[in-house]
Amino acid sequence: MNFYIADDDINIVKILTSIVEETVNFEVIGSSCNGKEAFNEILLLKPDIVCVDLLMPVMDGNTLVKQLKELKDNIYFIMISQV
C-alpha cells in the first residue's frame, strides 16, 4: 500500500516515514508541509492511505480531507495532531 504524509513538522514526517517503510508492502510515495501542496500531490500520486496533520499552514487537515473526499472516495485517512 502507498502512503502519503501531510505534516508541517519535518521530524514527524521522518518518524512516520521510518515506521511505514519498516512494514512489509508499505511505502511512502510523497509528503508535504502544507495542505494545499498535499492536495495537489495526492491527486497526482493517488496514494492508498494519507496521514494528515490537523493543524497545517495554507490548508488545514480537516479541509484537505473534506476536499479530497469530494473528489475521491477510495482513500483512507489517518488524522494526527500535536496539540
Image: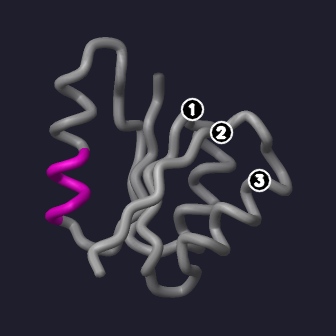
Identify residue type, mark 2. Answer: Ile
Q: CA distance from mark 2 to mark 1?
A: 5 Å
In-image side of 6 versus 41 (left or right): left
Q: Main secondary structure of the magenta part?
A: helix
- For the magenta stretch, what is the residue range? 11-16
Q: Position of residue 32 (x, y in %)?
A: 41, 63
> Which label sits on residue 77?
none
Helix, strand or loop at label 1? It is: loop
What residue occupies the far bottom of the structure in this picture?
A: 58
Residue holding disc 2: 75
**Is residue 61 covered in magenta?**
no
Which mark, residue 69?
Answer: 3
Which numbered disc flags the more N-terminal residue, 3 or 2? 3
Q: Position of residue 49 (x, y in %)?
A: 52, 38
Residue with the mark numbered 1: 48
Mark 1 → mark 3, Cα distance in angstroms: 13 Å
**Residue found at x 73% / y 56%:** 68
Membership of 14 in magenta stretch: yes
